[in-house]
Amino acid sequence: MSGYYVGETSDFKTNENGMLATAEDVGVFLRALNDGSVFNKGEKEIYSSIYVYDHGGLVPGYQSLAEYHKDIDTVVIQFINTTDFEGYEWNLSEISINRIVKILKRQYK
């Protein structure tokens, strides 16, 4: 889908820089990072001591959050096709993803 950002006329999905992925792609990759299947023997322990494997990012017109929740063995991904750089949209996205996780955790019990 196209992103929307006030004052920006280009569509980042058509740029040749950056990365495009589906929610499924991100979920598969995030799960593989967390279960260690993308690493060679011994690498997971090294990288896991340095990194938390989740993602949050934004560019004009797009933002995303992706989290793995080990306690319910679930990856939650949120893509949004608008942004602002004052934090309003980001705060709303964190509220909504946290509500989704809360619902999933209740259903998991």
Image (cartoon, rainbow, N blue to C red):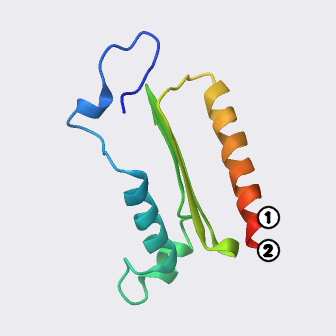
Q: Of all residues shown, which one is farthest toward the top? A: 7
Q: Nearer the viewer, residue 95 or 104?
A: 104
Mark 2 neighbour class, 10 Å CA radius: few under 14, some 14 to 19, many 20 or more:
few
Q: Of all residues shown, which one is farthest toward the front? A: 107
| Residue underneath mark 1 | 106
Q: Which circle marks residue 109 in the picture?
A: 2
Q: Is residue 99 left or right of residue 67?
A: right
Q: Nearer the viewer, residue 79 or 34?
A: 79
* Secondary structure category for the residue under label 2: loop
Residue 19 position within the rendered picture, expressed as x and y whole percent measured from the top left: 30, 45
Residue pictured at 72% horizontal, 41% vertical = 95
Residue 26 position within the rendered picture, expressed as x and y whole percent measured from the top left: 42, 57
Quarter holding residue 12: top left
Quarter holding residue 7: top left
Residue 5 position within the rendered picture, expressed as x and y whole percent measured from the top left: 45, 18
Q: Distance from label 1 to label 2 (Cα)?
A: 6 Å
**Against 14, is 68 above or below?**
below
> Tags 1 and 2 in contact by the CB under 8 Å rule?
yes
Kind of residue sitting beneath label 2: Lys
**Against 19, is 108 above or below?**
below
Residue 4 position within the rendered picture, expressed as x and y whole percent measured from the top left: 43, 21
